[in-house]
Each structure stands twice: as C-alpha cells, then as structure tokens.
Image (cartoon, helix red, strand yellow):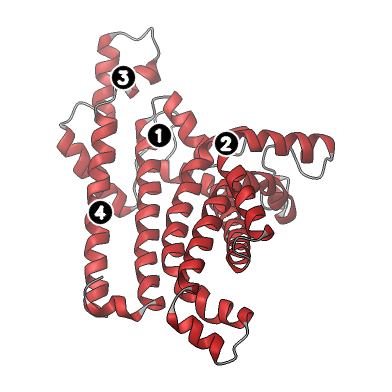
Amino acid sequence: MSVFLLKRFVSFVATLLAASVVVFAVLEILPGNAAEVRLGPTATPEQVAALSAQLGLDRPAFTRYIEWVGGYLRGDLGVSVAYDTPVWSLIAERLRVSLPLALLAMGLTVVVALSLGVYAAARHNRLGDVGVMTLSQLGLAIPNFWLAIVLILVFAVHLQWFPAGGFPGWNEDEGGGLWDGLQALVLPAVALAAVQAAILARFTRSAVLDTLREDYVRTARAKGLSRRATLWRHVLRNAMIPVITIMGLQFGNLLTSAIVVENVFVLPGIGRLVFQAIANRDLAVVRDVIMLLAGAVILINFIVDLLYAWIDPRLKGGDA
C-alpha cells in the first residue's frame, strides 16, 4: 500500500509541476502588457517601461516563473494589477461563493445521476430505461447558459421562488444569511448539475449493466438474495470504479464551467473574477486562478486514485 501511495504522490507532484509550466508559458506568450492596461492608452513608452520594471515584468521569464512557484508554495500570490489587492485575498473572497456552488451542484449531480442510472439499469430495455436515456440526452443537448436563463425566467421572474441573480452573503453583516445564500445558489447549481447529471447517469447505467452480467451476481441471485439487495449491496460498489473516475473529472468541470453560469447569475465567484481579470489583462490573477483550478482537478484525480484502492484492493498490488 505504501508503494502505491508513493507512486501516486510522485505522479501528483509531477503533474502539478507540468501544469504550472504550461499555465505560465501559455500566459507568457499572450500579446499585451499589464503595465499598458493599467496606465491606459495615453501612457508614454517611458511610463510603461517604468511600471513594467516596478511590476517585475522586465525580468527573464525563468526568474519570474521560479518566483511565482516559490510564492505559491509560501502562500504569497502577489498583488493584482487591476485591484491593487493581494491575489490570495481576491481568490479567498470569491471561493466563498464558488466552492459552495460547486459542492451543491456536485451533490445534486451525484444524487440524481446515481438514482437514475441504477433505475435505468434495473429496468433495462423497458419504459423506465428509455425515459431515463431520453432525459439524459436532453440534458446533454442543453447548454448551461441557456438552461440558466430559462431557470431565471421560470423560477425567479414568473414564480418568484428564487432570486434572479446576485449574492446576498452568508451572514447578516453582509446583508444576507445562510438561507439567503443557499437560495441564491440553487438555480446556478441546477444549471451546472443538469449536464453533469446526464453524463454521469449514462455512465452509471452502463457500469451497472456490465456488472450485472458477472458470475457472482448470478450466484447471489441463485442463493435467494433479492434483486434490490443484489443491486445495492454488490453490483453498485463494483460498478463504482468507472463512475468515480467520471465524478472526479466532473467536479473539475463544475469549477471551470462556473465561469459562464456565474456571469449569467451575476455571482461574485471565481468565474466572474477570471472574466474580469482577462478583460483587465490582469495576468497575475488569471495565472493564479487557472493554476488553482488545475491543482484542484489534479488533487481530485489523486483522491480518486486512492478511492480506487479502497473500493478494489487488487489495485494496490503495484500494477495500478
């Protein structure tokens, strides 16, 4: 088990390092200059050069990369050019919205998808199966932003059950509260979860159907175990390995696809921060947020690998 963990940890660190090189290099070759954006179109070349030196933009790329990685390891992400605020403060403030939104959307995705996927597999080629597959196909075809607009029109404008946008905060000092904050995240979470639930439901159905054909399932049924008990006690756990893979990827997708949905609902989250930072050519914020999202995806995949070993002990043998 220790060898398995060591291999996975080394792979985790190497992937993080590779991701940091790619993120830094891609943003480095983009045209434009943060100093030019900050000073405006009327700035002289001398003023741009002076501010570039002050911001450290005139130093070699390798030096700036080492300083950036070192700052990341120390928790010092630098200062935003557009906001003149520490980048970590901006990210932490926006994570108070984006992280609960992603967790709520993922929770909805898992509950809906696993229920529908198992239900469809248990009624293979019957009406229930056809209904779930049709519903999932619709979920795959509908864009997140379009569904978000429809949800606003139906549940916020006409029924007035939920707010149409904005975020009141998590406490009374911010003008809101826990319940108000959750209400503001329900419609965005549904918009994010719809596509992900459709994908996961189809994978769950396929994985459960494959597992139902195994010999040990027929043996369990022959011994008198009910179909429901066989399905939930034996089949689902063994079918979870490919399903967990998709779950890990989907949580990363939820964090990244929130950029569009947060802008539709005017939520002050990570997605809106990236959108504004790109418009302001604030590369410090863009680079740090993208690296944070990439690191989150890599960390989730690392956790998924550990879950594999817990679900299927055979993977600890060294061939995993």
What SS does tag 4 mark?
Answer: helix
- Location of residue 35 with respect to 277 vertically, above or below: above
Between discs 2 and 3, the one toward the N terminus:
3
Of the residues shown, which amino acid type is indicated by label 2? Pro
**Which quadrant of the structure image shows residue 266?**
top right
Of the residues shown, which amino acid type is indicated by label 3? Gly
Question: What residue is disc 2 on?
Answer: 143
Between discs 2 and 1, the one toward the N terminus:
1
Image mark count: 4
Question: What residue is disc 4 on?
Answer: 15
Q: How far apart are marks 4 and 1 (CA)?
A: 26 Å
Q: How far apart are marks 1 and 3 (CA)?
A: 16 Å
Mark closer to the observer (4, 2): 2
Question: What residue is disc 3 on?
Answer: 32
Mark 2 and mark 1 residues within 8 Å of each other at the beta carbon: no
Q: Which mark is residue 115?
A: none
Crowdedness near tag 1: few (<14), some (14–19) or many (≥20) residues, C-alpha within 10 Å: some
Of the residues shown, which amino acid type is indicated by label 4? Thr
Q: Distance between the residues labelled 4 and 2?
A: 31 Å
Between discs 4 and 2, the one toward the N terminus:
4
Mark 2 and mark 3 residues within 8 Å of each other at the beta carbon: no
Q: Residue at 62% of width from left, 43% of height from top? A: 138
Mark closer to the observer (2, 1): 2
Crowdedness near tag 2: few (<14), some (14–19) or many (≥20) residues, C-alpha within 10 Å: some
**Which quadrant of the structure image shows residue 66?**
top left
**Which quadrant of the structure image shows residue 51?**
top left
Q: Residue 80 carries which label?
A: 1
Q: Can residue 57 be seen in this view?
A: yes
Between discs 1 and 3, the one toward the N terminus:
3
Q: Position of residue 247 (x, y in %)?
A: 47, 59
Q: How far apart are marks 2 and 1 (CA)?
A: 32 Å
